[in-house]
Image: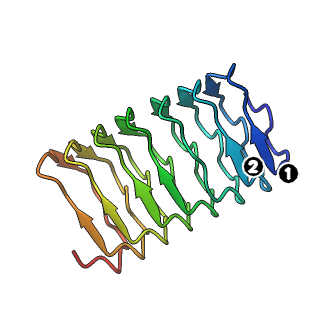
Amino acid sequence: NGAFVKCTSLEQITLPSSITSVAYFAFCSCRSLRQVTLPSSISSIENFAFADCTSLAQITLPSSITSIESSAFSNCTSLTQITLPPSMTIIRMQTFVNCTSLKQITLPSSLTSIENESFTGCTSLEQITLPSSITSIGYATFSGCVSLKKITLPPSLASIEDYLFHKCKSLKE
């Protein structure tokens, strides 16, 4: 846990194939980290693993990942796009909170649930397509996404929580 936390000069890292999980707080607050290469052996990214990595602009997630835990990418203010692996079923709470440069996210067709505040404060996110497998969306999930213009809610959606689109002043459809 916290293996590289606050290594402020670390700019890039390639994890070896012997690694199966990115641990809690592993790279938290590595503010110069720009490039991360994850091996196909990775199955999980734990809580706050890349939180506050403010220079991380892009990361490729291998298809072997089955879980990304809460706040794993919170406050990654340079992250512009991300594609979630096909085996993911849940986006945990605050996973991408305050990723202010996030413009594009590709969600897998296996996704069934998005937990509370997952995208809160993603001020550059303009559009998101929810897969037809989604059944629940948590509290304030898109709150403060001031650039969000379009979202399609699938017929499979059984529950949405309060403040889902709070302060989404650009939402038109």
Amino acid on which the number 2 mark rests in the picture: Ser
Q: Badge 1, how many Cα within 10 Å: few under 14, some, many 20+?
A: some
Left/right of residue 36 with respect to residue 63 in the rendered view: right
Name the residue rendered at 32%, 75% in the picture.
149
Of 72 and 64, which appears nearest the observer? Answer: 64
- Tell me the crowding category of disc 2: few under 14, some 14 to 19, or many 20 or more residues within 10 angstroms, Cα based: many
* Distance of label 1 from label 2 (alpha carbons): 7 Å
Question: Where residue 55 sits: x, y (%)?
Answer: 72, 60
Determine which residue is flagged by label 1. 8
* Residue at 31% over, 40% down: 111
Label 2 element class: loop
Q: Pick the residue in front: 119 or 62.
A: 62
Question: Does residue 62 sit above or below 120 in this rendering?
Answer: above
Residue shown at the point (56%, 67%) measured from the top left: 100
**Marks 2 and 1: in contact by CB < 8 Å?**
yes
Question: What residue is shown at x 37% (from left), y 72% (from top)?
Answer: 148
Tell me the number on the disc at residue 66: none
Of residues 150 and 36, the one drawn nearer to the viewer in this rendering: 36
Name which quarter of the figure residue 25 lies in. top right
* Mark 1 residue element: loop
Q: Residue furthest left?
A: 155
Percent position (x, y) of residue 26?
Answer: 72, 35
The first of marks 1 and 2 along the sequence is 1
Residue pointed to by mark 2:
29
Q: Amino acid at mark 1?
A: Thr
The part of the image, by quadrant, that contains residue 144 is bottom left
The picture places residue 68, in percent across and down from the top left corner, at 50, 36
Question: Hey, which residue is sitting farthest right in the picture?
Answer: 9
The x and y percentages for residue 3 are: 79, 31
